[in-house]
Image (spheres, rainbow, N blue to C red):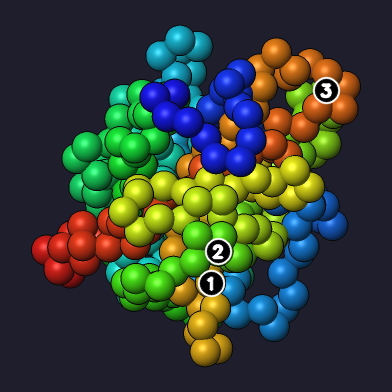
Amino acid sequence: MGKSFTSVAIIMLLSFTVSCDHSSLISLQNNDSIVGGNALQTEDQLQNHVVLLKTKYTNTIRKSTEISYCTGVIINDRFILTAAHCLNFELFESTEVVFPLAQKSEFYGLNKIIVHPDFSSENLKRDYSKLRDIALIRLKDLPPQPYSSLPIFEYSKRMPENLSFGALGFGEQQGSILKKIPKTFDLRSVSLETLNFNLESPYFEVLQTQRGICFGDSGSPAVVKLRQQNYVIGLAVDVLFDPSRTFERHYDRCLQQSVFLNILYFKNWIDQKIRQLN
């Protein structure tokens, strides 16, 4: 992958894009989504900042229309932040932004989507030092009630290397290819810790052997709390696993390791685009 990983030997680990869950939407109640996570309670304000993204595109191999499911976070009255690979399809048709708490959704075309100019899907597979998997969706109107924006953490030189944070997402509840558990797209949260947070790096890694993000959680915000205020510090973009173990009965691909985009590294780009398009 053009880099050495921290804390674990992952010579055989293969990256797999978390964000895009290319499966049918099944609406069932009382099931997990994030692996080992917890359902958000009604009073939890974090759910007021996170949306479900459904991107319709044409699969050129199957020659059929498909839907990719991702997560996004509102960071400004008019902007949603998510992973670029959730939206960057060659034959893109539209993205539906779903606000579950308001029981409302809106559709957006490419003219409302801003993908980082240096984004490349190839960098998801090998060289994370060149990771630019970040995009913005410009909303037509203010988000419906009770939705509001979640600010990005302000730059600090004293950020700890092993940083505890929470992640929220609509993704799958497990990564075992042999288990048939229905997908629910319920918003859930999980507590995680970075392995190597560095302000000068575009990404950080998480060892998630008991709980963590899974397929469908790309764009899931990494959130820290300081003085009673929640801030975004990262976005889920990838899970890593050993492909040789994929068909082992008890092997869960989502309980190995994950990669998050470091939002602080991209804050200047985000601020510039919001100023230009507001």
Q: What amino acid is labelled 2 in the image? A: Leu
Marks 1/3: CA distance?
34 Å
Q: Quadrant of the C terminus?
A: bottom left
Quadrant for residue 10, please give it.
Answer: top right
The answer to whether residue 154 of the structure is visible from this angle is yes
Q: What amino acid is labelled 1 in the image? A: Val
**Residue to which mark 1 is pinned:** 224
Q: Is mark 1 on a helix, strand or loop?
A: strand
Say above or below: 264 vs 62.
below
**Residue to which mark 3 is pinned:** 178
Q: Position of residue 89 (x, y in %)?
A: 35, 30
Q: What amino acid is labelled 3 in the image? A: Leu
**Crowding near pointer 3: few (<14 within 10 Å), some, many (20+)?**
few
Mark toward the start of the polypeptide (2 vs 1): 2
Q: Is mark 2 on a helix, strand or loop?
A: loop
Given contact means CB atoms under 8 Å apart, are the residues at marks 2 and 1 in contact? yes
